[in-house]
Image: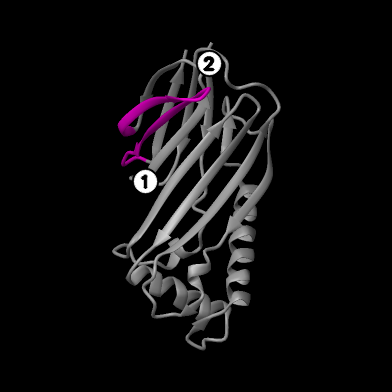
Amino acid sequence: MRKLVVAIPILLVLFILIMPASAQMTWSNHIILKNNIMKWNYNESYTNSSAILYRDYIDSQLGDDSGLVNAWEVLKMDVKVRNYLKGELEEEMDVQINGSSENIQVTDIAAQMGFETLGNINKTDRIDNRYSVDYIFDTPVLNSDTNFTFRGQNQSEVVIELADTVEINSTAGMENVIVSEGENTTFVRGNIGNTSYFSLYTE
């Protein structure tokens, strides 16, 4: 019997809610999937006009609107993002196994805001932020004949990392898929398709 595992990541940054669709922002995902735990790492980058808008949002909405972003304002953004994510996860768990999240626990939510955010809001210097969510599965999930389905940010890069003892059957919902081997590790790389859903089948 196939076991269905669904992971639905929350877009971690409130900035997505205020950023124009045309702004320069990139998003990438790195999922480390083990038998009883999973870590989903997110990286986001802002350049050019998106970097200006991001700094301006922090300074005007969370700071003193001085035209400069200081460390205290960045810390407030860090807290705001973590609280937002925590609230979303409490409302609806973003990982499901066999249609249920009953046996899944979130153990940690972390954020690392880029130091490049500091300074004049009109800077176009690249900003890199990193986020991660850790999960525990009460029962093993890397059994044979398993279907893992995730929902991520469409058109973003994704890497899924598993033990090399797991046999990859196929993938779905991913473009430009490359499967490679590392030291005791299998990497599945690609881009999430237009639907935001992507799947990994093991055998």
What percent of the width, then of the height, locates residue 144?
A: 53, 12
Q: What residue range appears in magenta? A: 174-195
- Seen in the picture, residue 78 relative to 98 is either above or below; the reply is below
The image shows residue 165 at horizontal and vertical percentages of: 53, 16
**Residue 191 among magenta residues:** yes
Q: Amino acid at mark 1?
A: Ser
Q: Residues within 10 Å of mark 1 (few under 14, many from 20)?
A: some
Mark 2 sits on what residue? 165
Q: Secondary structure at mark 1?
A: loop
Q: Amino acid at mark 2?
A: Thr
Gap in Å between the C-alphas at discs 2 and 1? 27 Å
The answer to whether residue 167 shows anywhere in this view is: yes
Prevalent SS, magenta region = strand
Inspect this view and state whether residue 102 appears. Answer: no
In the image, what residue occupies the spot 66% across and 27% down? 36
Residue 181 is one of the magenta-drawn residues? yes
Instruction: Give the residue at x 68% y 23%.
Output: 139
Q: Which mark is residue 156?
A: 1
The reply, left or right, for residue 104 in relation to residue 70 is right
Q: Nearer the viewer, residue 155 or 163?
A: 163
Between 166 and 63, which is closer to the camera in this rendering? Answer: 166
Q: Nearer the viewer, residue 141 or 102?
A: 141
Say if mark 2 contacts mark 1, CB within 8 Å. no
